[in-house]
Image (cartoon, helix red, strand yellow):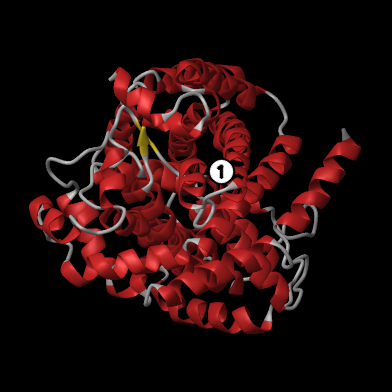
């Protein structure tokens, strides 16, 4: 097992290292940002208004509202990475790592928009009448020939495997460990409760997940951000110095102090980018799966709504965690017992305990971690089942939901160091085919985005108005054909589209 752990760690270091996935993720985000005319900056507020205030496009095809699609994606991404991941980046890469997490988030918004656009543009409808979309479909439908099929199937396999790791067992393990530490509850008890709760939600499918996350996710984010803002207000005089340290350290690195491991510029960039992408999943293709289920009148509209998920995750929640860690000095606290810097797992808890009175800090981190991790389980269960539908068909979706729920118990009750390493690798490998696809399809994305925003720059056009300026547009009729029940089977090799239509 030790040898396997070493092998997995070495593979993970290469996949998430400075010479493989990180430059590809950053480069793709920058390239798409330029091709889309810095879309994420001048369309952010209309997108927030559409997704959070207006929340839905009336009388449109889809399983859940645009707001529910957004909260489902947020449920999957706002997780332990926003608490422990930020601490890991700052602990190893120094405060400057937070700057590179911001850069990753800003560039990642273009990647998130692009993959969500493609997911809706090339979505299909399975035999149960549910929408299916994401890289497992659009890579094959948009990129003709063996390359597209290979990329789509590769993504589907890696995403399916990742759903049991980073989307399931690791989250359950984090919850069980923190509950045991806080309330002395045995992990097996936590495991049973989480398994039952997960199963109760999952049997209802995406509509149940959407309803739960629509009510649950805003509460958990407001709860965590409010506690963070209280600490930042109390430490208001330290915020300017914290920003100065972040921006200075981002380009110089931090020298070792006491037990602090120290960093140089490349380490700050590497950990900032890696943990930023781990947190918001931009470019990985996962959140696009939730976007495909949205009730929307045009793919551009849902792409813009989905883009705001990265903004909320990284520019708001991650920033709150990072500033709390830096302003309270928790990033440079030395453990008296070991003489070394405290671990990332304890750093955020130390920051909130220092910043809030009494035991409040301890409670906030524990409760926040429970909510974040459980929401991630729900979001990733949907990602996994859509890839099961792609690989094996609708008949195995319900068995997958049951097995996925039972695996939560396993995650709560067994050591998971190897699972963590394996999950990191799967996350990286599922991003690879998606990023290749985004680069290949960037021309299509940019062209169709310009056309739509030329006619509806403020995202206020009605369904009838959209139909009027899209009716003769190439691909418009094809998008509507994705509403045919059973059309997802066209891309699994089980039935041609004509036979499905004839049957229906």
Q: Which residue is mark 1?
A: 152
Coordinates of residue 316 in the picture (x, y in percent): 39, 61
Coordinates of residue 351 in the picture (x, y in percent): 53, 57
Q: Depth check: give the residue in front, 287 or 171.
A: 287
Compared with 305, 427 (above or below) is above
Q: Depth check: give the residue in front, 76 or 467.
A: 467
Per the image, label 1 sits on a secondary structure element best described as helix
Compared with 166, 355 (above or below) is below
Quarter of the picture containing the N terminus is top right
Coordinates of residue 450 in the picture (x, y in percent): 29, 70
Quarter of the picture containing the C terminus is top left
* Residue 350 in sight here: no
Q: Splitting the image into 4 quarters, where does residue 176 fall?
A: top right
Q: Residue at x 66, y 43 (%)?
A: 426
Compared with 226, 33 (above or below) is below
Q: Splitting the image into 4 quarters, where does residue 487 fall?
A: top left
Q: How many marks?
A: 1
Classify 10 Å Cα crowding around label 1: few (below 14), some (14-19), many (20 and above).
many
* Residue 95 in sight here: yes
Q: Residue at x 66, y 48 (%)?
A: 429
Q: Is 124 situated left or right of 158 in this image?
A: left
Coordinates of residue 64 in the picture (x, y in percent): 26, 36
Compared with 106, 207 (above or below) is above
Residue extending farthest to the right is 3
Q: Is 490 situated left or right of 251 in this image?
A: left
Q: Depth check: give the residue in front, 63 or 92.
A: 63
Q: Residue at x 38, y 68 (%)?
A: 446
Q: Is 9 situated left or right of 78 in this image?
A: right
Q: Residue at x 36, y 37 (%)?
A: 124
């Amino acid at each position: 097992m030790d040898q396997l752990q070493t092998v997995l760690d070495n593979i993970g270091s290469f996949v998430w290292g400075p010479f493989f996935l990180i430059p590809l993720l950053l480069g793709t985000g920058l390239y798409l940002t330029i091709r889309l005319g810095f879309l994420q900056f001048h369309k952010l507020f209309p997108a927030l208004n559409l997704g959070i205030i207006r929340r839905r496009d009336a009388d449109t095809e889809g399983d859940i509202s645009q707001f529910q699609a957004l909260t489902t994606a947020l449920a999957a991404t706002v997780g332990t990475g926003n608490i422990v991941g930020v601490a890991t980046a700052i602990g190893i890469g120094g405060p400057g790592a937070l700057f590179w997490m911001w850069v990753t988030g800003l560039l990642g918004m273009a990647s998130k928009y692009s993959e969500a656009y493609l997911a809706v543009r090339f979505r299909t409808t399975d035999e149960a009448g549910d929408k299916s979309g994401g890289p497992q479909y659009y890579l094959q439908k948009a990129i003709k020939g063996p390359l597209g099929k290979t990329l789509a199937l590769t993504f589907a396999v890696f995403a399916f495997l990742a759903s049991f790791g980073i989307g399931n067992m690791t989250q359950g393990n984090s919850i069980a460990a923190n509950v045991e530490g806080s309330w002395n509850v045995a992990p097996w008890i936590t495991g049973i409760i989480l398994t039952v709760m997960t199963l109760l939600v999952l049997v209802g499918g995406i509509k149940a997940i959407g309803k739960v996350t629509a009510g649950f996710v805003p509460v958990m984010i407001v709860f965590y951000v409010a506690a963070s803002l209280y600490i930042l207000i109390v430490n208001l005089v330290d915020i300017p110095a914290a920003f100065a340290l972040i921006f200075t350290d981002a380009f110089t690195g931090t020298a070792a102090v006491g037990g602090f491991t120290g960093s140089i510029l490349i380490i700050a960039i590497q950990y900032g980018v890696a943990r930023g992408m781990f947190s918001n999943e931009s470019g990985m293709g996962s959140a696009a799966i939730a976007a495909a289920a949205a009730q929307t009148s045009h793919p551009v509209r849902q792409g813009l709504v989905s883009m705001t998920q990265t903004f909320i995750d990284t520019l708001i929640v991650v920033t709150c965690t990072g500033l709390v860690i830096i302003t309270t000095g928790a990033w440079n606290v030395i453990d008296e017992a070991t003489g070394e810097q405290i671990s990332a797992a304890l750093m955020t808890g130390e920051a909130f305990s220092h910043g809030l009175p009494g035991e409040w800090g301890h409670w906030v981190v524990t409760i926040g971690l429970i909510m974040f991790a459980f929401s991630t389980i729900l979001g990733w269960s949907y990602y996994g089942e859509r890839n099961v539908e792609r690989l094996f068909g609708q008949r195995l979706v319900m068995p997958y939901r049951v097995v996925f729920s039972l695996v939560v118990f396993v995650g709560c009750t067994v050591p998971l160091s190897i699972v963590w390493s394996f999950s990191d690798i799967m996350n990286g490998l599922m991003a690879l085919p998606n990023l290749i696809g985004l680069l290949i399809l960037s021309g299509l994305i940019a062209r169709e985005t310009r056309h739509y925003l030329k006619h509806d720059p403020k995202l206020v056009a009605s369904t009838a108005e959209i139909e009027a300026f899209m009716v003769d547009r190439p691909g418009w009729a094809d998008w509507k054909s994705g509403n045919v029940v059973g059309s997802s089977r066209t891309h699994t090799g089980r039935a041609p589209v004509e036979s499905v239509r004839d049957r229906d």
